[in-house]
Amino acid sequence: MPIETPVVSEGLQKTFRDNFPSQIGAERDLHVSDTIIPIVDFSSTAGVSGLDTSLQQAIAFSNQTAFNINSAATTTIINNTGFFRIFGCANIACGDNDIEIAFVLSDGSTDKKIWSLNAIFGTGQAYPKNESFDFNVFLQSGDSVKVLTVGGSNRLVISGSTRQLADISGTLVNPTGYTGS
C-alpha cells in the first residue's frame, strides 16, 4: 500500500484547491502518490514562439496595409478572411454640408456601419473633429471592410493601417520576419 505523503508546496496545494473545489473539506489534500494528468494551456502565447500577445500583434513593415482617404468614396480596405486589427485617425476640417466617415462591415449583400464620425452642417458643431479608432474584426469568406466617406472632399481625411492578427482558423500571424527563438 502506498504511503500517503502530502505535497508540502502551499502554492501547489492552493492551485489544487482552486481548480478542484469539491476537494475542499474532504480532509485530504494533494498527495505525492496521486496521479496528476497535466493540461497545458497555450492560449496566452502566440504559436510555439512564446511571444506575448502585444509582441505577436506588433506592426512590421511587410504585414500592415496603410490607407489614406481624403475624398468622398467607398473604399474596400480588407477583403480577406481572418481576424484583423484596424487603427488610425479620422478628421473632419470644416463643413458647409453634412460629412460622414464610417467603417462598414459587409457580407456582400448587406452593409453594417460599425464605427462613424459625423458632422451635421448648420448645427453649430465645433471643428475640427478628430477621432482615433482601434478595433478588431473577423471576416468570413465573402465579408469585407469598407471605408465610407460622404460629403466635403478635401474637408475630411481618414488614415490608418490594417494588420492581420490570425487566419480564419485562429492561427496567429506573427510579425513578418519574426523567426522565433
Image: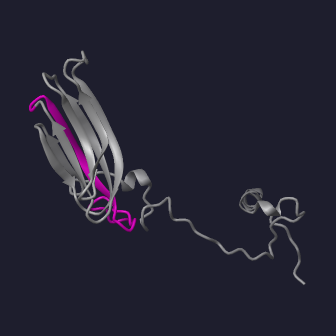
Q: Quadrant of residue 129?
A: top left
Task: Give the vertical position of 168 relative to 14 (above or below).
Answer: below
Q: Is residue 114 above or below residue 155?
A: below
Q: Residue lying furthest bottom in this view?
A: 1
Q: Quadrant of the C terminus?
A: bottom left
Q: Is residue 167 magenta?
A: yes
> Which quadrant of the figure contains the N terminus?
bottom right
Highlighted range, magenta: 153-181
Q: Is residue 138 visible?
A: yes
Residue 35 position within the rendered picture, expressed as x and y whole percent measured from the top left? 75, 77
Image position, residue 177 (x, y; %): 27, 62
With 93 as the anchor, is 115 left or right in this view?
right
Query: In the rendered image, is residue 9 in sight?
Result: no
User: Toward the viewer: 139 or 67?
Assistant: 139
Q: Residue at x 10, y 37 (%)?
A: 71
Q: Main secondary structure of the magenta part?
A: loop
Residue 146 x/y as whole percent? 22, 49
The answer to if 23 sits in the magenta stretch is no
Image location (x, y in percent) of residue 18: 73, 57
Q: In the rendered view, would you say 50 is above or below 132? A: below
Q: Quarter-wise, where is residue 47 in the image?
A: bottom left
- Frontmost residue, 54 versus 2: 54
Which residue is pictured at 24% across the width and 47% down the height?
A: 161
Q: Going by the image, does 140 lie left or right of 38?
A: left
